[in-house]
Amino acid sequence: MSIPTVLVAASTLSILSFPLVLEYNHFSSRISFHSLSSSSDEDLHQHLQSLNLAFRSSQINHNSTAVITDGGVKKSHVATAVVHVWADNSVIKQLQVYSVSITPIEAELMAIHTGLIPVMEIDNIYNMTVITNSIAVAKKILESKVNSLQNMFIPLASAVKTFLSKDGRNNIHF
């Protein structure tokens, strides 16, 4: 069943309904977010061990990949997104994207987008482990509330929906 996309005008921003959000319950078992529970040294150590295990596990399975992203804005107001995509214990893609006049949140989203889109197009990749320091930004991909960045989230949400719909084995872990 196809979910209609509705175009709504809100000032100068065109906003589309989020088909992924409407189907999130259908995909919820295949998208997971693992963030640091507290800032204690013990929790940080456990979280780092979990990240290390997730990374190593993604390199053992030939149908898995690890996407490591980081984005930020320097004092020069130039945003940089850096992505390393790992498979079979080696970097298969290394990407850098630059932009100006964007916020740190937009830079982090740019990094996640830059990493996920090319990996979703690789045949026989069913499991993506995304390592980012922006779990909050990643979670916004699935939110339905209207915000000023929604026009950036829509293409990524659509790509995530397409990736998850392509094969029942496909999943993404942040």
Image (cartoon, rainbow, N blue to C red):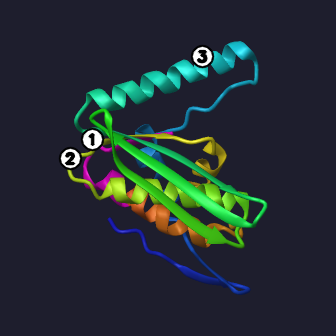
Q: Nearer the viewer, residue 133 or 25?
A: 133
Contact (Cβ within 8 Å) of mark 2 with mark 1: no
Please give left or right for residue 79 compared with residue 68 in the image: right
Residue at coordinates 50% horizontally, 59% vertically from top-left? 96
* Disc on res. 46: 3
Magenta residues?
A: 162-174
Q: Is residue 163 magenta?
A: yes
Would you say residue 22 is visible in this rendering? Answer: no
Quadrant assignment, res 38: top right
- The type of residue carrying mark 3 is Gln
Label 2: state its secondary structure: loop
Instruction: Identify the residue under disc 1.
Output: 169
* Circle 2 residue: 124
Q: Is residue 102 left or right of residue 112?
A: right
Tag 1 near tag 3, CB within 8 Å: no
Please give the name of the residue rendered at 35% of the width and 68% of the height, measured from the top-left corner.
2
Q: Which-is-in-front pick, marks 2 and 1?
A: 2
Q: Amino acid at mark 1?
A: Arg
Residue 49 percent coordinates (x, y): 53, 18
Residue 75 rendering spot, x and y as whole percentages: 79, 60
The answer to whether residue 120 is visible is: yes
